[in-house]
Image (tube, rainbow, N blue to C red):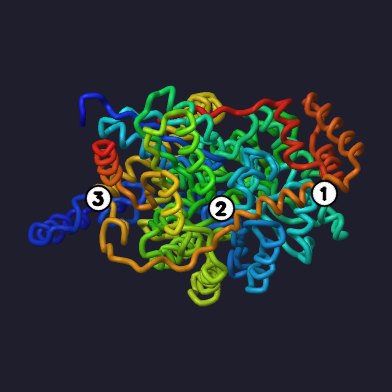
Amino acid sequence: MPEEIEKQKEEWEREAVEALISRHPERRSEFVTGSDKPVDRLYLPEGFSEAEYLEKLGFPGQYPYTRGVHPTMYRGRLWTMRQYAGFATAEESNRRYRYLLEQGQTGLSVAFDLPTQIGYDSDDPRAEGEVGKVGVAIDTLKDLEILFDGIPLDKISTSMTINAPAAILLAMYIAVAEKQGVGKEKLRGTIQNDILKEYVARGTYIFPPEPSMRLITDIFAYCSGEVPLWNTISISGYHIREAGSDASQEVAFTLANGIEYVRAAVKAGLDVDDFAGRLSFFFNAHNDLLEEVAKFRAARRIWARIMKERFQATKPKSTMLRFHTQTGGSTLTAQQPDNNIVRVAIQALAAVLGGTQSLHTNSREEALALPAEESVRLSLRTQQILAYESGVTSTVDPLAGSYCLEALTDRIELEVWQYIDRIEALGGMIPSILKGYVQKQIQESAFRTQKDIERGERVVVGINKFQMEEKKPQELLRVDPAVRQLQIEKLSRVKAKRDASRVQDALEKLQEGAKRKSVNLLPLILEAVKEYATLGEICQLLREEFGEHRETIVL
Amino acid sequence: MTATKTRILIAKPGLDGHDRGAKFIARALRDEGYEVIYTGIRQSPEAIVQTAIQEDVDFVGLSLLSGAHNELFPRVVDLLAANGAEDIIVFGGGIIPEEDIPSLKDKGVAAIFGPGTTTKQIVEFLESAREGS
């Protein structure tokens, strides 16, 4: 800090602040961010010589991308408004997608039910009670054909939250597009395909790490040639944050997972610049506006350095961290649910000020149930108001240069590097997960947060302050339990119509391929799904070859 | 607290991976002096009941956020009864719509705790349920 400012700051603290505080104490003895990190009373111009500006911030669309991945950001094109949706059957979800598109949504985001995500068909006994509940049920290609009926896959981009069976859903998507007459080279969208965060936070893993990493690498390799516009992975901090991590941990564990995927692909013989441009990220947006904006900026800067310095990526695209954001589900309250509308607006603003490429805004009743159509529309309108009325889209990285924001960005960057170094010292992310290190860090933060709420040290409006008696909640969306039966009947009709010997043949070829690591499984999976082999059949076969992951329980 | 420690199994039935709440409760109850066992995610009702009996617990706390509670919670209650362990008290938490609570209680789930519940509320329930049993 320049000397004169330093000197005057000390005077100001001594004369103005202390004198005032002695008469009127501040509201708290220490102010902290949403991630429980100290916040100073005032930030001053620190660390901003010309050289430091150019090194740390630079220009939008240029390394290290702190200020954004595009030179003009939202002046050029707004973010993609993409509401995560899906429930019950493909028929019902198709209706919701068409509604959202009519309302001005610009991309689709598919939620699958848990049996689909864990590789069980709807008629599997383990699927009891879960079919169609948290997303749409997909058993065969037939369901995906219905899901995208009347939706032109060359015009719309689709994100699919699918991890362990990502290769199967991608194959089905390619097959549906083919039936629509759309070549796979034109397909735009994303599969989540991020298994490492499933082990630490989200829980829909199937196979152990090694074969899971092979499936992921197979997808990278296949898409770089065949589906060049597809985002082959969405490396996700969202669920890590939902599981209770703080902002720095969210970025740290996500980027450490990213390092692991890049390392695996390079080890499998891929050139980093052939796949790195198709890696995408997914972050959370919580309530602490400034810390969240700083988080997104820090994440971009760190990833650019990792890709350039550790992996010697040379294409600019390979070093750009492009990300989707969803507002924070765990910040929503079941009490006074309308308050959630306000929380979501603040969180969405953070994502936009942080330079997100796409955004999902949660709906008010999501601490109680899946959102009704009207609530989803309101969440979409929140994005549209930010986009068209708030004015924050008119300039690039509007908060840059705020002393506070830059200090927070630097602080998060420092903490993230410390975590990454620790994980590398443990041998990388996979050993860190198997030892429970990552889970432990997340749980410690989650526990502290909840204890702070229970003690009233962290105020949650409507929970531990400003509570009130409430009327019965509004009408909630319910998934009819009969969905499972409908789905089972549909599945048996598909099974009766398909050519059993061709299915058998395709599955046998896939099984053979699974035994040999040098074989890319994608083309074999594509053949199997085209014959209407079920998701459960394919996953069962892979379970036999690969085994199943067992959770490391950490309390 | 009574002389013999109350034993509680915190379990995650079904396919749901949201374990933040279950893990918090497990640890918070342990800090309150209970013996707590946590199953991990994706447990079948059969496996939960087997663990509950083996571990000789007083309570089973089920946590579920995926919406399969109407099927899975009563199944745990029924299986406990079928195995002669109807004295084990079952309670639940998660994303459970208000209107589902009466029928879950009818089917033998002693209490349901939604989002915003504090450790204290659960401890109060455990203590009064224990005295009542």
Q: Residue at x 45, y 66 (%)?
A: A345
> Is residue A310 positioned above or below A292 on the image?
above
Q: Can residue A32 be seen in this view?
A: yes
Q: In this view, does A394 lie above or below A489?
A: below
Marks 2, 3: nearer the viewer: 3
Image x and y of residue A472, in percent: 39, 66
Q: Which amino acid does label 1 sit on?
A: Val
Q: Can residue A301 be seen in this view?
A: no
Name the residue nearer the viewer: A406 or B31: B31
The residue carrying mark 3 is: A457
- Which residue is rendered at x = 72% and y = 61% of the image? A91
* Residue that mark 2 sits on: A65
Q: Mark 3 lies on which chain?
A: A
Task: Assess whether mark 1 and mark 2 are in contact (beta carbons under 8 angstroms).
Answer: no
Give whichever of B65, A269 is nearer the camera.
Answer: B65
* Residue sitting at the far bottom: A389
Which residue lies under the disc numbered 1?
Answer: A494
Earlier along the polypeptide chain: callout 1 or callout 3? 3
Look at label 3 and name its amino acid. Glu
Name which residue type carries label 2.
Answer: Tyr
Q: Distance between the residues labelled 2 and 1?
A: 49 Å
Asked if residue A202 lies left or right of residue A493, the reply is: left
Q: Residue A61: horizontal and vertical position, in percent? A: 60, 57
Residues B21 and B49: in front is B49
Please count the marks in the image. Answer: 3
Observer-side mark, 1 or 3, equals 1
Q: Which residue is drawn at 34% across and 45% down?
A: A449
Circle 1 — which element? helix
